[in-house]
Amino acid sequence: MANVEIPVAEADNLGPAVVETVTARPVFGQNLFDGFRQAEFRGFNPDYKIAIGDTITLQMWGAYEVATELTVDAQGNVFIPQVGPVKLQGVANKDLNKVVEKKVRSVYQSNVNLYASLNATQPVKLFVTGFVQSPGLYGGFSSDSILAFLAKSGGIRPESGSYLNVELKRGNKTRAVFNLYDFLLTGTIEQVQLQDGDTLVVNTRQGVAAFNGLVENTVQIEFTDGEIPLKDALQMVGLMPEATHVRIARNQLTKRSVDYLPLTEAQNVTISSGDEVTVVSDKMPGTISVAVEGEHSGQAIYILPYGSTINDLMARLQPNERSNLKAMQLFRDEVAQRQKAMLEVQLQQLEQTALSARSKSVGEAKLRQSDAESILQFVARARQVDPRGQVILGQNDNRMDVMLKDQDRIVIPSRTVLVQVHGEVMFPNAMVFDNDSNINDYVNASGGYSQKADQSRVLILHRDGTISRIEYKNGWFNKGLARYDVQPGDEILVMPQIDPKTMQYTSDIMQVIYQVAMSAAVVLSL
């Protein structure tokens, strides 16, 4: 087990961050009371002891007929006409019919049948206090669980209340102590019959430690006696299958120390209040899986040693006569995630700019509002775009030395003589490559530019993932100078123009449009 001590003077920057993390993390069991706020318990436990105020339904037939509801009076009795008082206080619900029948038989030996059942338990009011959200007096029934009353008070305060020490007091004595973790983990809780005037007290929480990383529940857990075996705590929060090691930041001493150990040693370790536990996966990869798609004659998945390069993959690949290896493409999930994150930053900035624009007049304010609505719709569409995550290999001499990662995807395009045109053209289409045609020729063959097209900005996506950005003025294309940029298999993307009304957002919008087009090969219009 590795142990590192960090002096307090050197850990000043770490301390507040740890406190903030622990405080913000939810508490194990914090959502326990959500399910009790809308439901009421109407069933009756067979062991429930009949109490003063309970209502009994009695039916008798035969020589003597009765159908009535009887309330247990202050002496604990119910009075049956022609029979007399019957002592029911303290009688178990399961024995109710037997006790009533015995009394009736003392008067009517035969020809009288009966059925008695508990109809409604006594309404009670309990004081709920201590570390709950809203201490006060709450009504319910004597058969209710304490969880129902805790829910009515808003539940336990997660930052200060205890889930392990909830007391039910009757008079000056403690009637029962509840550990709510028993209910959370095993579904067991003591069923105590409540009485009018009982008090539920949620005491202050005890030791607490925070868990994050590869656990099923990133929460704080509470424990008694100042410490808990690490293996018990991990069982509560749940481990993910890939977890191998645990890092324990111990914060209760004058020096902040860090322990790092494999999970196999967890049974010999305890954690204390204030510790922060991070579960990680610390294992060297042995092999990686790479998918190969497109034009080739080999298998779809290749298992390679960790550290393999594209060149190592090529030694096992089986290209055919249609494979265009020069245009080979590499796609990676982490690149797609990064592209998505960068796009989200741009969209948030655009959103903020549109919503915070100031106007000098009422008319300008209405115009800005209309622009903002259009921009927000554009932002919503842009958020639905999924970047491809392409790693640009190009024709660099070192491209075959790129190290592959697990779950990488290699796409080998087939040889083609087609050129695709899409974006702001009248009829997006694919057409045969012509060495004598320039960009305008391909656009004209697709019906020409649409009314929303920005004819001065065009992107060309080459098969190998590289991108050419073509800008021209004064008929630059007509001179044929852009012919060199179009090759067989390329995609021509015509960018949209921005409405002059949104001039103050033009640069932000164009940045998003270009980012989407380059990362996802999609053109969005405002």
Image (spheres, rainbow, N blue to C red):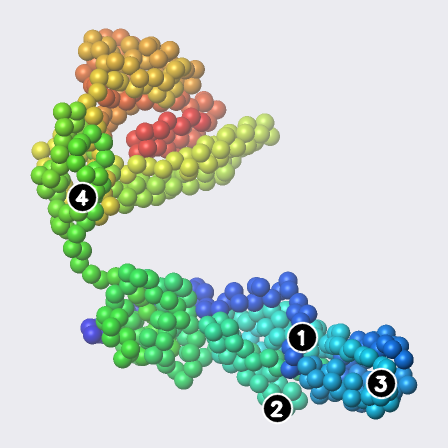
Question: Contact, CB < 8 Å: mark 4 with mark 3?
Answer: no
Q: How far separated are the C-alphas under marks 3 and 1? A: 31 Å
Which element carries disc 2, helix, strand or loop? strand
Residue for badge 4 = 302
Residue for badge 3 = 110
**Image depth: mark 2 or mark 4 in front:** 4
Query: x, y percentage for residue 146?
Result: 61, 76
Question: Contact, CB < 8 Å: mark 3 with mark 2?
Answer: no
Picture layout, residue 324 above or below residue 56: above
Which element carries disc 4, helix, strand or loop? strand
Query: x, y percentage for residue 467?
Result: 24, 27
**Image depth: mark 3 or mark 1 in front:** 3
Q: How far separated are the C-alphas under marks 1 and 2? A: 26 Å
**Image depth: mark 4 or mark 3 in front:** 3
Q: Amino acid at mark 1?
A: Phe
Residue for badge 2 = 173
Picture layout, residue 159 above or below residue 173: above
The residue located at (67%, 71%) in the rendering is 43
Query: x, y percentage for residue 361?
Result: 58, 30
Q: Residues within 10 Å of mark 4 (few under 14, many from 20)?
A: some
The residue located at (9%, 33%) in the rendering is 397
Q: Is residue 211 visible?
A: yes
Q: Residues within 10 Å of mark 3 (few under 14, many from 20)?
A: few
Residue for badge 1 = 44
In front of the other: 350 or 334: 334
Q: Amino acid at mark 2?
A: Lys
Relative horizontal placement of residue 167, taking residue 276 as reference (left or right) = right
The residue located at (86%, 87%) in the rendering is 108
Which element carries disc 1, helix, strand or loop? loop
